[in-house]
Image (tube, rainbow, N blue to C red):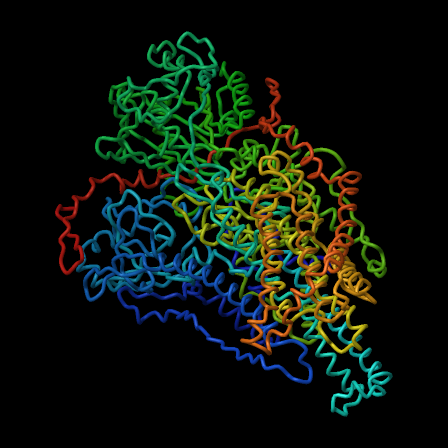
């Protein structure tokens, strides 16, 4: 048993998942690496071993080749959109033997349907084409014929050398060659890739920076690049530049990805590596899926059902006609038509005749009516002023017109964090210094006030005026200098960082590796300690107006394992000090045992954590000269270590970062978008579960979970290790229950957790791969695969692979079941591909309707995978919006999109479909009842023109308006009572049961419409002594009763009456009578005698009171039972919306949402740490190298020649 179990586990079991790592190598799965031919000879094992020993490890995977300024060298795939013009020739020639209707009865409705659908699709396609054209026609400068010339994005190819200017979007994945900044630094904003607005820097190779600044040198550049094939890994790049007989390694720091925006850099030059569909942003987009709603699929099956019913009815009536011909037709001389066909052949012809007569059962106009309703609902979303974001002039936009009602059926929402739930804006809110908390609303005398003006920083010349702070007592402490720790606290914030600074028009501009660090340095600047400048070895600070320069002896940079950063400086007085900031969990372990404010600071951290603020602890120590000299030797030795350099440095850092003195703690607010907690709360009440999928760190994601109230203090959180053990135990139980009789035993649905309690799941990308058995095989094991030698080995291997797939599928299903038992799920450090995988798992195993919402290119795959994708617009990044089905500017608008527009759209569509099937069956089945009285001869019960116009004019407008305008309760009540949303999730308003009830209603109505006039016409005499019981008068009576009945029926179905609804109902009835009198007039008969044969029927029949009484009786019998049933159901079994509608005036006052009250107990924290620093490795290496500190190049003159700008260096670099 153990051997079998071992054979199933072919993943790397020796490595524990790392919570801090984003597992980006996610396009090399075990299956792909193991996908070798099954018929490989055993000799291949020897070949593989030799290749493994002799291969060049780098060149093996770098097969993409690019030559600068040479498009033809690289054979770029040509993706051509081949368009096929399909012309379908349809001939509406009536077949005399089976034709029972005029040709126009089918052609006119069909042309209307096709015309409206074509116009609607044309509008959609033109809008998409316009947006694509706008992007494809963006311009940049490309070297052609030795000069920079303006070219469109769609013309850019691999190998082109291009120039980009400040605020330009990057059109392709390019290798940075040079820029206007020192050392060819280039600052980029990646909001379109990951939603983050803080700037990141890229830096070219020194050799390209040195030689490729001028246009003529760029035009003659002939470098050759070998690199990896196009892939979806946004943070990795491997390649080599071969130039001037030397090779230079390339990594991700030298690549500008498509979708980035050039910031704070006047211009830069680059070589196109990947273009078009090969760019990383496009590789992350996933497949574009054709999305259809649940109702679409259901509607199609119902139409199939109707088609089967149509065939069965036609077959039955055809059999009846054959029997009737045999029994009656052959023996009645007056029925002889000159044809000597057998009864069975006549029955065959009549079958097709009834297919034509009863074809209105299969509603041709249904689909176009649905499209018109969806188009109108989409415009209502676009026009909704309550979803318009005035600050950025961004309205809501329905980018598709086919998914509106699905918005009313959502079960799961998958949301990105950065830029979607949060604004990615960090604000300094509070701090604790020397055990004292600052940041409350206090005056200078330390008295609390509810209303107080914010602090005036005008006394500080370097203040940026953007910090809103209300504690005047802190300003008093800084200015008085009574507590030196206060000044030292802000001095630490001003000196301990890796922020870059430049001056523009006398203003300081900070470039930080993370928004957190930028917020802390800006706070120190506003409180009087402004960071002014730095060189490779110095840093200059303005301390309350006095500039002082400190020698930087070492920067101990931040990383995710250390969770802290330190800086060692020498003061102007010659003292050496170490300043450190980091997570409380790591700082407290390194404090000197004599720290009097340790407990007070811990209490403050608990308070900050309770307020969901992100915290860092600040500390320092003084270092003796001798101690530093000894440590510096170890530091320098570790810095130049050839192997395990990072581990050696961390070990040296540990030696100096001890016996620290605690200064205090900072509290930063990661600002949520407005209304996020309220929106999440309301969606939860609507039984919609929200999962957060983010690439951010676990601590940061958890902190945001508490801030937006997905998590609360009484939530039990399960992490990766807990989930893995639970799933392992479940798999063992399932294995033990398995066996010969397992398939006969009913499946056991066990819950993972005991009932009661609030649980949440927080899992990282690495653990997700481990749990879902998606862990990747290492690259160096590719060629060590063992190939089967015999047929038996091949069979065993196939069976093992199948068992592995079955195990993987069961494990994934168990994970989804476990996750769905939790009230909240947060997946952090996940790749775009993993985001899509999680969405797909829920779709596959829960059969639930999903919605994904995000704002960056890393969310595109998830947005495309979900049933509905929503993009957050208004940011610079628009890639998610372009791939989405709906877009708006703020997360809070999601509640209105779902609870109002989604719910209304679902209710309207369900009412529309139920009514549409009802009215078509009521109309069509009259022919069925009539067939029993006409020898099953396929004779129609109506005039041909009535059949033509019934769905087009007489009954179309009221049902369309109901589908567009009806609402059971107002938008405010829909938001106030989210529980109303549940009917859509449970498919209560339209399903097979409702469908068959509508069909039954239609059948009963058709019986009433036929048999009451039939009974009234038997043995009757009119006022003029003539019998009105002719066929044409009978047809007019039934048609009139039908139009009135179905139009009044929609009046009963309407919940929200407007003038437009009333006008459409009575107007449709009036239109019917007006057209009927025209078509029955003598004048039109003279013009078209063969098409209009009911001459004078309407005027003769409808002047008889008896016929009017018949029509009134028919309508009353058809509608009164419906009125009675509706009254009883609303009185005895009222729905939730019925109750709210009944008491709507009393409920009119809108309920104000209240944030959940947090119960805080001093000294007792359910969370160990509120540390949530979104800091990646900083700029320490860049600063220490001195490459960014050199004097900036002189500006380049712009010389205009031949319509292009040539930049020449005017200063000596």
Most extreme residue toward the front is 1024
Q: Position of residue 1102 (x, y in %)?
A: 68, 61
Which residue: 20% across, 66% down? 145
Q: Quadrant of residue 60?
A: bottom left
Taking depth in this image into account, of 583 and 816 the one nearest to the observer is 816
Above or below, comparing residue 702 to residue 2 in the picture: above
Taking depth in this image into account, of 609 and 1037 the one nearest to the observer is 1037
Q: Quadrant of residue 29?
A: bottom right
Which residue: 44% across, 44% down? 395
Which residue: 55% across, 19% down? 603
Q: Position of residue 246 (x, y in %)?
A: 28, 60
Q: How many marks?
A: 0
Residue 560 visible within the image: yes
Residue 14 visible within the image: no
Taking depth in this image into account, of 1151 and 1183 the one nearest to the observer is 1151
Above or below, comparing residue 707 to residue 624 in the picture: below
Q: Position of residue 1127 (x, y in %)?
A: 76, 42
Which residue: 33% across, 37% down? 511
Above or below, comparing residue 992 to residue 797 in the picture: above
- Would you say 1032 lies left or right of 149 here? right
Taking depth in this image into account, of 1087 and 567 the one nearest to the observer is 1087
Quadrant housing the N terminus: bottom right
Q: Position of residue 247 (x, y in %)?
A: 31, 60
């Amino acid at each position: 048993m153990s051997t079998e179990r071992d054979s199933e586990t072919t993943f790397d079991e020796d490595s524990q998942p790392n919570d801090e790592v984003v597992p980006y190598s996610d396009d090399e799965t075990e299956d792909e690496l193991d996908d070798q031919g099954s018929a490989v000879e055993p000799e291949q094992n020897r070949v593989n071993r030799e290749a493994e020993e002799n291969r060049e490890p780098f060149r093996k995977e770098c097969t993409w080749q690019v030559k600068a300024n040479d498009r033809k060298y690289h054979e770029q795939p040509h993706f051509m959109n081949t368009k096929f013009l399909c012309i379908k020739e349809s001939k509406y020639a009536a077949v005399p033997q089976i034709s029972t209707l005029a040709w126009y009865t089918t052609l006119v409705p069909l042309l209307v349907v096709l015309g409206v659908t074509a116009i609607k699709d044309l509008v959609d396609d033109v809008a998409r084409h316009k947006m694509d054209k706008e992007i494809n026609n963006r311009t940049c400068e490309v070297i052609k014929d030795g000069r920079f010339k303006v070219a469109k994005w769609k013309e850019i190819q691999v190998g082109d050398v291009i120039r980009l200017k400040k605020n330009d979007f990057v059109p392709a994945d390019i290798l940075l060659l040079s820029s206007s900044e020192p050392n060819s630094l280039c600052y980029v904003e990646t909001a379109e890739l990951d939603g983050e607005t803080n700037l990141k820097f890229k830096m070219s190779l020194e050799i390209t920076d040195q030689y490729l600044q001028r246009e003529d040198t760029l035009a003659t550049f002939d470098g050759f690049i070998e690199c990896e094939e196009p892939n979806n890994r946004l943070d990795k790049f491997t390649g080599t530049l071969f130039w001037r007989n030397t090779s230079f390694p390339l990594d991700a720091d030298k690549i500008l990805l498509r979708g980035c925006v050039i910031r704070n850099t006047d211009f830069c030059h680059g070589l196109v590596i990947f273009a078009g569909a090969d760019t990383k942003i496009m590789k992350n987009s996933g497949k574009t899926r054709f999305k259809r709603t649940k109702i679409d699929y259901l509607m199609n099956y119902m139409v199939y059902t109707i088609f089967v019913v149509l065939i069965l009815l036609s077959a039955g009536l055809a059999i009846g006609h054959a029997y009737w011909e045999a029994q009656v037709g052959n023996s009645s001389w007056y029925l002889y038509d000159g044809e000597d066909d057998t009864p069975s052949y006549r029955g065959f012809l009549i079958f097709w005749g009834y297919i034509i007569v009863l074809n209105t059962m299969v509603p041709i106009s249904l689909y176009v009516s649905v499209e018109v309703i969806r188009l109108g609902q989409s415009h209502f979303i676009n026009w909704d002023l309550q979803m318009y974001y005035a600050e950025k002039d961004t309205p809501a936009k329905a980018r598709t017109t086919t998914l509106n009602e699905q918005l009313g059926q959502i079960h799961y929402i998958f949301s990105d964090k950065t830029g979607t739930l949060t604004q990615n804006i960090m604000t300094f809110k509070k701090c604790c210094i020397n055990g004292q908390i600052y940041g409350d609303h206090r005056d200078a005398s330390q008295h609390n006030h509810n209303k107080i003006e914010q602090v005036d920083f005008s006394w500080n010349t370097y203040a940026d005026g953007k910090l809103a702070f209300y504690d005047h007592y802190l300003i008093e402490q800084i200015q008085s200098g009574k507590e030196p720790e206060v000044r030292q606290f802000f001095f630490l914030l001003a000196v301990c960082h890796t922020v870059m600074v430049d001056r523009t028009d006398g203003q300081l501009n900070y470039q930080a590796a993370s928004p957190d660090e930028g917020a802390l340095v800006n706070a120190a600047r506003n409180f009087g300690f402004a960071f002014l400048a730095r060189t490779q070895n110095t840093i200059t600070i303005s301390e309350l107006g006095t500039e002082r320069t400190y020698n930087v002896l070492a920067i101990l940079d931040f990383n995710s394992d250390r969770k802290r950063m330190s800086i060692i400086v020498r003061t102007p007085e010659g003292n050496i000090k170490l300043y450190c900031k980091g997570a409380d969990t790591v700082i407290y372990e390194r404090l000197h045992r004599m720290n009097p404010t340790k407990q007070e600071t811990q209490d403050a951290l608990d308070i900050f954590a309770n307020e969901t603020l992100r915290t860092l602890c600040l500390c320092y120590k003084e270092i003796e000269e001798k101690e530093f000299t000894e440590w510096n030797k170890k530091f320098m030795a570790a810095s130049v270590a050839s192997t395990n350099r990072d581990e050696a440095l961390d070990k040296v850092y540990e030696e100096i970062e001890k016996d620290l003195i605690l200064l205090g703690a900072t509290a930063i607010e990661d600002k949520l978008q407005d209304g996020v907690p309220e929106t999440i709360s309301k969606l939860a009440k609507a039984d919609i579960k929200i999962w957060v999928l983010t690439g951010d760190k676990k601590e940061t994601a958890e902190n945001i979970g508490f801030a937006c109230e997905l998590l609360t203090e009484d939530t039990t959180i399960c992490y990766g290790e807990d989930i893995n053990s639970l799933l392992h135990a479940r798999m063992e139980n399932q294995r033990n229950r398995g066996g010969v009789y397992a398939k006969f035993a009913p499946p056991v649905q066990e819950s993972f957790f005991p009932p009661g309690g609030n649980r949440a799941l927080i899992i990282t990308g690495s653990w997700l791969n481990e749990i879902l058995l998606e862990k990747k095989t290492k690259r160096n094991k590719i060629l060590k695969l063992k190939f089967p030698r015999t047929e038996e080995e091949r069979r065993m291997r196939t069976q093992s692979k199948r068992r592995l797939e079955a195990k993987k599928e069961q494990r994934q299903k168990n994970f989804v079941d476990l996750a769905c038992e939790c009230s909240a799920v947060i997946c952090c450090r996940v790749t775009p591909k993993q985001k899509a995988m999680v969405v797909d798992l829920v779709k596959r195993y829960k059969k639930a309707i999903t919605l994904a919402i995000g704002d960056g290119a890393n969310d595109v795959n998830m947005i495309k995978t979900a049933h509905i994708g929503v993009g957050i617009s208004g940011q610079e990044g628009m890639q998610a919006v372009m791939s989405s089905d709906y877009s708006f500017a703020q997360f809070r608008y999601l509640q209105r999109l779902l609870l109002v527009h989604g719910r209304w759209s679902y209710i309207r569509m369900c009412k529309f479909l139920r009514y549409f099937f009802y009215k078509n069956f009521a109309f069509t089945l009259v022919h069925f009842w009539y067939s029993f009285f006409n020898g099953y001869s396929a004779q129609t019960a109506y005039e041909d023109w009535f059949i033509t116009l019934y769905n087009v004019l007489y009954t179309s407008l009221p049902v369309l308006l109901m589908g567009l305008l009806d609402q059971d309760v107002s938008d405010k009540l829909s938001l106030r009572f989210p529980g109303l949303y549940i009917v859509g999730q449970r498919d209560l308003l339209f399903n097979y049961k409702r469908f068959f009830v509508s069909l039954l209603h239609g059948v009963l109505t058709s019986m009433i419409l036929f048999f009451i006039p039939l009974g009234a016409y038997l043995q009757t005499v009119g006022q003029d002594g003539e019998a009105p019981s002719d066929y044409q008068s009978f047809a007019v009576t039934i048609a009139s009763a039908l139009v009135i009945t179905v139009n009044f029926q929609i009046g009963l179905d309407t919940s929200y009456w407007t003038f437009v609804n009333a006008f459409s109902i009575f107007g449709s009835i009036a239109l019917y009578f007006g057209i009927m009198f025209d078509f029955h007039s003598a004048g039109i008969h003279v013009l078209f005698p063969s098409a209009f044969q009911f001459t004078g029927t309407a005027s003769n029949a409808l002047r008889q009171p008896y016929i009017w009484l018949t029509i009134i009786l028919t309508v009353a019998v058809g509608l009164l039972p419906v009125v009675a049933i509706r009254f009883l159901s609303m009185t005895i079994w009222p729905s939730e919306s019925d109750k709210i509608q009944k008491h709507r005036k009393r409920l009119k006052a809108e309920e104000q949402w209240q944030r959940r009250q947090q119960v805080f107990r001093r000294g007792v924290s359910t969370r160990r740490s509120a540390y949530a620093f979104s800091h990646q490795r900083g700029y320490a290496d860049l600063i220490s190298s001195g490459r960014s500190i050199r004097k900036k190049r002189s500006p380049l003159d712009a010389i205009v020649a031949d319509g292009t700008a040539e930049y020449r260096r005017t200063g000596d670099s």
